């Protein structure tokens, strides 16, 4: 049975800042200094702490904080055959258009050696479930509804398809996408059976397609596999999402779209409203769109008829905790476009998209969530 939700449910996008003990343990595991079981115990403790802080803050739909993941999509390299992590510096050595790649790196607020990309180096298939173990563990420790974030099929395909490496195994990006769709459908089927309340597909770079017109690429799409035509890419994204979710109508599935979440320097992040994306988002067969709206970069609220809105109301990249009154005003504006039973409340994005580069402390993250919950209670009462 689905967990009963209150009016204006408060939830998270997914990631939570990792404690230093966990980051150290992850480094030790990669270096072979500790075993898998020791790492798992430290991961379990970090998940329980993230859960405790979410529950205490008044979150109605919790996540495990992605504590076991290095970031929101690269973690799949440990779960899939045919995928290897490559740093952007390594990728620079193999891509043909080195000048274009170097221009991209120059626009980022991160060093090339510090970011890695899951790259297709063979035929891709599941070695183990992507997130089923995360859900199973969390269900043992909470009676609240659970959200499980997964990388969406478009970003996963585009990131993994580095032509100079992948073409030895797949004739095209679309051929790789067929295997990605199968992997995600198998995963979602298992998550639904295990009782996930909300499955979220992360597709943050759809905004990049309409705001950069193929001229630049963020590091999240270091594969450079997108075409210059954003329409073709958006059509591909819609097709892949719809193929992945087909038949899973009994469980709430959403798509999350933002404008980048790797830096506190807002000038490095994308700017523009959702209107240019609306025709494609409308055609995605998902119940909810989880969208960024807490910064002026996101533009005006857009109404998506027939869909729920996961309204981003706090900025995960600032230390200032938004007040209840500020959030009440944002929610009121959204209620002019959406009925209350179609509105969910969340941060713009995760608080720790990349494990080694948290955007907020756990204390600030918890305070922001508590402010959202206080605003929600104002309307519920």
Image (spheres, helix red, strand yellow):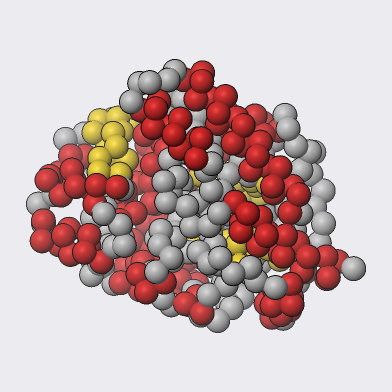
Residue placed most toward the observer, 340 or 137: 137
Residue 312 pos. (x, y %): 60, 66
State the residue lying farthest toward the right.
Answer: 381
Residue at horizontal 57 percent and vertical 72 percent from the top = 294
| Left or right: 103 as drawn, with respect to 247 | left
Q: Is residue 227 visible?
A: no
**The N terminus - image quarter:** top right
| Left or right: 107 as drawn, with respect to 70 | left
309 versus 41 height, above or below: below
| Left or right: 220 as drawn, with respect to 153 | left
Residue placed most toward the observer, 129 or 322: 322
The image shows a total of numbered marks equal to 0
Residue 186 pos. (x, y %): 51, 33
Residue at horizontal 51 percent and vertical 18 percent from the top = 37
**The C terminus - image quarter:** bottom right
Residue 172: name its quadrant: top left
Residue 124 pos. (x, y %): 33, 32
Residue 163 pos. (x, y %): 18, 46
Residue placed most toward the observer, 26 or 6: 26
Q: Is residue 326 visible?
A: yes
Residue at horizontal 17 percent and vertical 58 percent from the top = 101
Residue at horizontal 50 percent and vertical 29 percent from the top = 129
Residue placed most toward the observer, 21 or 307: 21
286 versus 195 height, above or below: below
């Amino acid at each position: 049975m689905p967990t009963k939700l209150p009016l204006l449910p408060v939830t998270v996008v997914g990631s939570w800042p990792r404690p230093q003990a966990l980051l150290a343990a992850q480094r030790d595991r990669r270096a072979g200094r500790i075993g898998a079981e020791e790492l798992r115990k430290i991961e379990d403790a970090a998940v329980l702490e993230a859960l405790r802080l979410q529950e205490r803050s008044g979150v109605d739909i919790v996540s495990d904080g992605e504590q076991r993941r290095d970031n929101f999509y690269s973690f799949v390299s440990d779960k899939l055959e045919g995928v290897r992590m490559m740093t952007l510096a390594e990728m620079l050595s193999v891509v043909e258009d080195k000048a274009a790649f170097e221009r991209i790196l120059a626009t980022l607020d991160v060093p090339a050696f510090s970011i890695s990309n899951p790259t297709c180096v063979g035929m891709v298939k599941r070695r183990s479930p992507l997130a089923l173990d995360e859900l199973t563990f969390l269900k043992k420790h909470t009676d609240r509804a659970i959200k499980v974030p997964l990388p969406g099929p478009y970003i996963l395909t585009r990131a993994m398809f580095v032509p100079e490496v992948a073409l030895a195994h797949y004739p095209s990006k679309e051929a790789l996408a067929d295997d990605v769709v199968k992997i995600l459908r198998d995963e979602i089927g298992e998550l639904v059976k295990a009782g996930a309340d909300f499955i979220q597909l992360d597709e943050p770079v759809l905004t990049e397609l309409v705001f950069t017109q193929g001229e630049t690429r963020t590091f999240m799409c270091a594969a450079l596999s997108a075409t210059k035509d954003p329409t073709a890419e958006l059509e591909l994204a819609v097709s892949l999402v719809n193929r992945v979710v087909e038949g899973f109508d009994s469980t709430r599935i959403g798509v999350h779209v933002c404008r980048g979440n790797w830096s506190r320097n807002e000038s490095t992040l994308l700017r523009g409203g959702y209107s240019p994306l609306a025709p494609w988002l409308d055609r995605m067969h998902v119940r909810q769109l989880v969208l960024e709206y807490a910064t002026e970069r996101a533009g005006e609220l857009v109404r998506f008829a027939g869909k729920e809105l996961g309204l981003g109301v706090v900025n995960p990249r600032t230390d200032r905790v938004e007040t209840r009154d500020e959030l009440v005003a944002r929610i009121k504006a959204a209620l002019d476009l959406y009925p209350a039973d179609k509105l969910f409340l969340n941060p713009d994005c995760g608080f720790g998209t990349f494990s080694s580069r948290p955007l907020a402390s756990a204390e600030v993250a918890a305070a922001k969530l508590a402010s959202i919950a206080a605003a929600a209670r104002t309307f519920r009462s």
